[in-house]
Every structure is written in C-alpha cells, then in structure tokens.
Amino acid sequence: MKNDNRDRVLIFFGDPDAPIRQVIRTTMASENYRNIEVFNKLQTLRDSIRNLDPHLIIIDSGLPEGDAIKLISDVRLGKVGRNPFVPIITTTWEPDRKTVRKIVDSGTDDLLVKPLSPAQLMTRISVLADNRKPFVVTSDYIGPDRRDDSARKPDMPCFDVPNTLEMALSGEDIDQTKLDGLIKEAMAEVNEQRLKRHSYQIEFLVRLIIPAVKEGKITIDTTAQIEKLCEISEDMERRVDDPQFENVVELSESFTEIASSVRKKLPEPDPMDVQVLAEVSQAILLALNPDLTQDSAVTEITDMVRKFSDRATAAELRR
C-alpha cells in the first residue's frame, strides 16, 4: 500500500464507544487515513451508506438502534447502498460462538475481537487491500471464501469482486460509470451462482418435507423447512428476471405459488401440492444446471439428505 493515497480512502467507522472512536480516528489520521466519517448509531450509518460510496466500512456488532450484523448482510444482498462488495471489517466485544457465527455468515470480510489495538486494525486493512479473499455464493451466503483447499468444490466456484479500498489506495481514478460496470458484472456472477445453489437447496428441502407430509408428522422442523422453502422461492423468482433465465421463469412462478399454498394449509398441507413441488423442483434443478443428468441429480440430493439425517441423528444422541 502507498501512504500517499491513504487520504483518498473514504472510511465509515461505526462504534458505540466514544473513546474508541477517538483513539482509532486519531491513530488512523496519523497514518494519513484522514477521510473518516464516524458513527455512534446504526441508522445514521445505514443512511450514509445509502447516500454515499465508502471505500471501506468498519462496524461494531453492538452499534445501537438496530441490528449491525443484519446491515452487513443487507449490504451484501444489495439492499443497502450501491456497492454490495464494499470491503467490511467487523469488530465485537462478544466472541461467543453464536455471535461469531452470525458475523461470519453476514458476509463481512474480517472480524476483530475487542479489545484490539490500532495496529491490529491497520494490519487488517493492509491485508484487505492487498490480498482480499475472493467471494463465494451459496443459497444463503454471499461473501469471502473461507474454505480451505480440501473443502472447495468445483461446482461452487469463487470469484474476484471490485475492491474499492485497493482502487483508492492505488491512486486509481474511481470513475462511477466504470465502478458500476464492475459491480454489474460481479452481480451477474452472484445471481447465476445464487440461482444454482437455490435449485439444490429447494430440491433438498422438498426431499425432507415429502416424508413428513405423507406420514402426517408435521413438526416444528417441517414448518421451518416450508418457511425456508418459500423464502428461497421468492428470492429465486426475483432473480430469474433476466433474459438468460427465461426458461426458468414459468417454473419459478409455479413453484412459488405452490409453496405458498403449502404454507397456508399448514398443519395439513395438500399431499398433491407437495408432490407437484417435487416435480417442479427437479425441473428447476436440471434447468439451472444443464450439465447435470437426472440420475446424477438424484444421487447428489440423496447424499445431501443422508448427511443431513446423519447429523440430526448425531445431535439427537448427544442430548
């Protein structure tokens, strides 16, 4: 990184603790990071992200007046701001397993546990600028790929996204039209990968739901699975609004309608609706994954269901 360009970097820094805000801001200014906007409430930070384009966001998970972790997720999903790929560092005083998992799953680039030193933060900023992790997309995650090499699957590729922090530090002129083009290109990749992962997830969920409906054993888990199915189908319907997915539009609309009907009829959904869901979900899976044969699709989903059942059984035995 070049120090002479650090004053070009627009940083949004949200922290509820005034002394921490002052120490971090002073330290960063001494390193020539002078263009820093500080926030002590979530709503003002959210509004600023909507109206401006920061090159880096540093946010504490405990920022008041809202859910800071959800804000990160909303940024990644493109619901807040114009750049879903803005670099984000999250800080927290709560390193318990549940909180850490929520932060990681939000799509943040990095997590720093407090108390932290300004030097730690500076190091993480350098790494994020020079060696940012590529992104990966699943049915419920958009963010940096944290898998090790052995866990990477060829059907779940990772890809580079625009790094505004790196651009600003390099002295590159960040033309908004050019940046919008880079974001659009990356979002197209996100959309394609998200739809593929959705197709696997809905087929998986339908496989879990069918036996429960047939046996008349609608549990809390089954209800949650149906709710998740509706959530995914609605997101999928929004994402297929693109000419390259025109072969899936009608299938997606039908699936959303039937899934909604199943949810409305709980706790006694129509078994015929669920059977149609199974047929449509498999058609969607094959349409969005043209290299997949019906036999290989059945094998993959069956394996997913088996692993899920094994984990559920193991969890039950540990109780």
Image (spheres, rainbow, N blue to C red):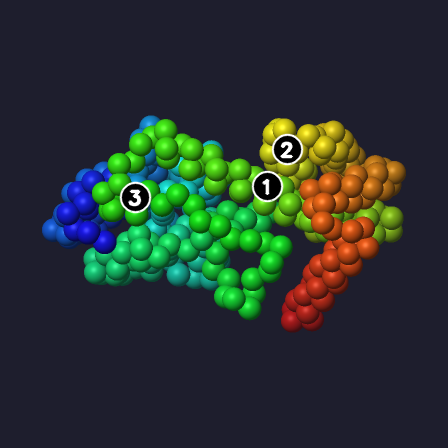
The answer to whether residue 67 is left or right of residue 21 is: right
- Quadrant of the rendering where the N terminus is positioned: bottom left
Q: Secondary structure at mark 3?
A: helix
Where residue 148 sits: x, y (%)? 50, 66
Residue located beneath label 1 in the image: 192
| Above or below, comparing residue 99 to residue 74 in the picture | below
Q: Is residue 80 visible?
A: no
Q: Amino acid at mark 2?
A: Gln
| Tag 2 near tag 1, CB within 8 Å | yes
Q: Secondary structure at mark 1?
A: helix
Q: Earlier in the sequence, mark 3 or mark 1?
A: 3
Q: Amino acid at mark 3?
A: Met
Of 318 and 192, nearer the camera is 192
The answer to whether residue 274 is left or right of residue 130 is: right
Q: Earlier in the sequence, mark 3 or mark 2?
A: 3
Where residue 50 sits: x, y (%)? 37, 30
Q: Secondary structure at mark 2?
A: helix
Residue located beneath label 3 in the image: 167
Residue located beneath label 2 in the image: 244
